[in-house]
Image (tube, grey):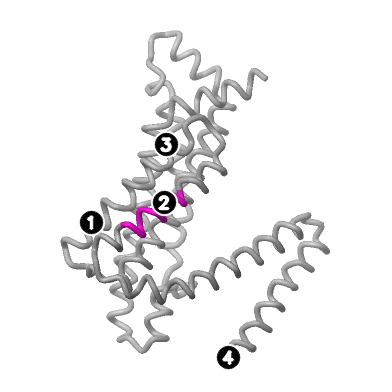
């Protein structure tokens, strides 16, 4: 089985490199390095899962999720490149991850089990990271295009957050577009990953679909909430960073 998957992986990555080359995308180096890096990361993850899934303490599981949150915040900081990037990323990703996870634990949707909390937590963290990055990137673009409008509102007496409110709203809209597209296409255009995984593991199809629905709605909430928190706590830092770049 491992040989078959290895051959398939090499063929898929090689084909992606060839397509990038012939289409003059200039992404061959990035594709190769990213492919090798994710292979090492996932293989390493496979090894440590044997240790992680033997942890029975809820505090140990939450500690692992906290460490994953720190790493997601560091990655987010390298992508958005603004003032206070790590602090603001950590606050938004931490709140967007732990608040819904704790609620799901209280309701009983997930159990205090590493086989459930770690994969779902990783899924939540990944979506929070993407939403934070997308919302900040869009806000930076909005500020560049509307800097004079925002400065005019401030000159007329508006505070900075009020002047930026419309730009912040548009940024959150952009961040959740992939989530809405996913909701519209799930079940018709593609079968979502959790449903596929549960079906391949032999779970009841209806149970798989219900579980997937909960996760999809969770991802939608994470997309809105993480982007909102990031812009609420970091709008001033993002604005000052953009002003610095514009005046250079």
* Residue denoted by label 3: 87
Image position, residue 127 (x, y; %): 43, 55
* Residue denoted by label 2: 128
In the picture shown, does residue 48 fall above or below 205? Answer: above
Residue 192 showing in the rendered view:
no
CA distance for labels 2 and 4: 34 Å
Residue at (52%, 48%) from the top-left corner? Answer: 75
Residue at (39%, 77%) from the top-left corner? Answer: 195
Residue 221 showing in the rendered view:
yes
User: Dot 1, crowdedness within 10 Å: few (<14), some or many (≥20)?
Assistant: few
- The answer to whether residue 162 is left or right of residue 6 is left
**Quadrant in the picture for the C terminus:** top right
Q: Are marks 2 and 1 in contact (CB under 8 Å)?
A: no
Q: Nearer the viewer, mark 2 or mark 1?
A: 1
Q: Nearer the viewer, mark 3 or mark 1?
A: 3
In the picture shown, does residue 228 fall above or below 220? Answer: above
Image position, residue 55 (x, y; %): 30, 70
- Tell me how many marks there are: 4
Region of the chain picked out in magenta, as a range: 63-72
CA distance for labels 4 and 1: 38 Å
* Residue denoted by label 1: 102
* Residue denoted by label 4: 1
Q: Are marks 3 and 2 in contact (CB under 8 Å)?
A: no
Q: Nearer the viewer, mark 2 or mark 4?
A: 4
Secondary element at tag 1: helix
Secondary element at tag 3: helix
């Amino acid at each position: 089985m491992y040989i078959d998957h290895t051959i398939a992986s090499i063929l898929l990555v090689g084909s992606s490199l060839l397509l990038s080359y012939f289409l003059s995308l200039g992404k061959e180096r990035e594709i190769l390095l990213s492919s090798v890096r994710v292979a090492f990361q996932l293989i390493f993850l496979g090894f440590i899962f044997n240790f992680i899934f033997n942890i029975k303490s809820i505090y140990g599981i939450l500690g692992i999720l906290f460490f994953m949150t720190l790493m997601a915040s560091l990655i987010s900081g390298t992508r958005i490149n603004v003032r206070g990037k790590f602090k603001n990323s950590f606050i938004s990703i931490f709140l967007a991850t732990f608040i819904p996870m704790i609620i799901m634990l209280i309701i009983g949707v997930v159990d205090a089990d590493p086989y459930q909390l770690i994969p779902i937590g990783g899924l939540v963290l990944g979506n929070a990271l993407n939403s934070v990055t997308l919302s900040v990137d869009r806000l930076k673009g909005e500020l560049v295009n509307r800097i004079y409008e925002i400065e005019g509102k401030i000159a007329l007496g508006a505070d900075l957050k009020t002047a930026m409110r419309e730009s912040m709203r548009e940024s959150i809209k952009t961040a959740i577009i992939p989530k809405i597209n996913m909701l519209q296409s799930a079940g018709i255009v593609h079968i979502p990953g959790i449903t596929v995984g549960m079906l391949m593991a032999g779970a009841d199809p209806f149970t798989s679909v219900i579980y997937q629905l909960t996760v999809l709605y969770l991802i939608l909430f994470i997309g809105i909430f993480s982007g909102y928190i990031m812009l609420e706590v970091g709008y001033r830092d993002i604005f000052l960073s953009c002003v610095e770049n514009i005046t250079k």
